[in-house]
Amino acid sequence: MSFQTPITIAEAVDNVHSSRFLLPAIQREFVWSSSKIEWLFDSLMRNYPISSFLFWNVEGDTVNGYRFYKFINEYRERYKTHNEEISTDGISSFSAILDGQQRLTSLYIGLKGSYAFKEYRRKWENSEWSIPTRRLYLNFQNKLTEQEDGRIYEFSFLKDSDTNQKDIYDNKWFRIGKILELKNISKFNKYVTDNELSEFSIDILARLQEVIHSDRIINYFLEKEQDLDKALNIFIRINSGGEPLNFSDLLMSIAVANWTEKDARKEIHRLVDSVRDKGFSISKDLVLKTFLFLYSKDIKFRVTNFSKDNAKEFETEWEKIRDSILSTFDLLKTFGFTDYTLTSKNAIIPIVYYLYHRNIFKDYSTKIEFKNEREEIKKWLHIVLIKKIFGGQADSVLTQIRKAFTTNITDEKIKQEITEFPVNEIFKNIKKDTTVGDEFIEDLLYSQKDDQYTFSTLSVLYPNLDYKNNDFHKDHIHPAASFEDLPDNLKEKYGWWTYNSIYNLQMLDANENMSKNDKALKDWVDEQTVNIDRSKFLENHLIPDVNLDLSNFEEYIEKRKELLITKLKEILN
């Protein structure tokens, strides 16, 4: 490995664009924010160092021996974040980037690409309205002053609709990609003359031209040996000490380098996208953690826990692991969960483990033979989420939970004899105290209607609704519109915080909720119990058998509090 003659940013970007610079499969994907790219360009304009790069000269048999990817230049938040694989057939040699991908991609996007991110308060959909395309511009009329982040030059990703406004474009913003066309001094001078630029603007653009075309900023080392293992080792050593690249990225790199029949990066990203299509967001971290839970004695993200051998085992078992994860998320949908109400993704890993090792993942969420078992798993999942079992020390808790499944853990591999989902054994193995008392439950019951934990709490209180078909509604028992009708002393004592909490919420099926609508509680109960047992109706709906007039709200709320605390202590303990 030797230090090479530095090159300019324009040369580096041209090498990226012409595929003379590629990304090895061991590299993670691009993760920098738009503001970080803007900050990078500000640093360049101010002649700040941006650290050296490490390239790997790939030639000969190595060219076609491994997978390589193009740089991304049209980044689209959530929807276009994956690098495209490139065929290296016909390419005799190129440089693979071992260190510096984020910076090079940022330069490429800034000068030749775009960065689309979601507009504030707009829904996630792959459209220009929600996620408009933006290109990088420089304010060449003014410099920034007194910025908290220390920036002087105002670089900003702007929408085309913004820059189409003539007064804004002509008088303030310069699209920095255009500087690539102004390498020649005569072209630069012609642009200045044609646009009648001020001396101040000329100085700023001249500095930008120097940064891109003249200053040899890209300092790099070049590794020439055609040995992927050595390249991987260098990559890990460089990146494991840096905070931006976490251990899951390193584990991914090892998997990518050692899978032979499948493309690990593509397979894992495809799984992440498939889960997203089911309505849930997961990362590659969860996929890798799940594999370690399935096959490694130590489930912590450590490079030593992910050797060549278990990376190959990961490939061998991949389809089964993938299908078990997808089946688990199908199951979660039948439980009524959304991405918002699934408050810990780690909680699903034991379910994946169970379906995988029993080999029952295919159509598990619909088979009649597993109906009772599904109810047990659903109740278990709600309880561990309510108790926040996985908060803080998820790895330790997962390790303890796995012992409930296994009969023997050797140094080499986990062996299991599983016949049912071991709810009781799981709670026995969790070392921290998971019992709950009145104070915990009282705090829980103050969860507001749209709080993340409200769904699980109401689900265990009302377990018999049709969650599978999403036929359930959260409902204010005393209607929300009636809060203003509370006597002033009760409104002041209890407030909206109590009125909008689980103390005054129930779960109803859709038809029942439509019939209730905004009816006064007493009128609704009277109507519903004309031909059925009133006491049984109240018991099923967890409504205290008291005077249900709004004026008697104090007795109602105190009695319901007692009722709910008793019920939840019974369920959660």
Image (cartoon, rainbow, N blue to C red):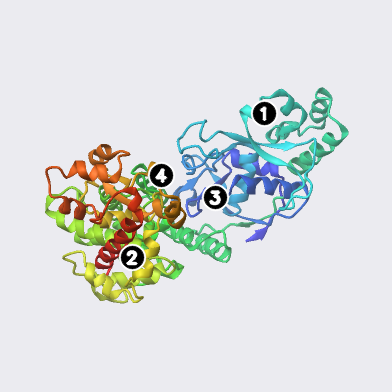
Which mark sits nearer the N-terminus, 1 or 3? 3
Which mark sits nearer the N-terminus, 4 or 3? 3
Which SS class for mark 1?
Answer: helix
User: For the residue carrying disc 2, how many other residues have a C-alpha within 10 Å: few (<14), some (14-19), or many (20+)?
Assistant: many
- Is 92 rendered above or below residue 130? below
Which mark sits nearer the N-terminus, 1 or 4? 1
- Where does the image place residue 516, in percent across and percent down from the top left? 27, 40
Q: Which residue is mark 3?
A: 31
Mark 1 vs mark 4: give the one in front: 4
User: For the residue carrying disc 4, how many other residues have a C-alpha within 10 Å: few (<14), some (14-19), or many (20+)?
Assistant: few
Q: Nearer the viewer, residue 414 or 157?
A: 157
Q: Which residue is mark 1?
A: 163
Q: Are marks 4 and 3 in contact (CB under 8 Å)?
A: no
Residue at point 50%, 45% (across, down): 69
What distance separates the C-alpha of mark 2 from that of mark 4? 54 Å
What distance separates the C-alpha of mark 2 from that of mark 3? 26 Å
- Where does the image place residue 565, in percent across and percent down from the top left? 30, 65
Q: Nearer the viewer, residue 379 or 94?
A: 379
Q: Which residue is mark 4?
A: 485
- Where does the image place residue 51, in percent across and percent down from the top left? 68, 57
Q: What amino acid is found at the position of numbered circle 3 in the picture?
A: Val
- Where does the image place residue 545, in percent across and percent down from the top left? 23, 56
Q: Nearer the viewer, residue 167 or 238?
A: 167
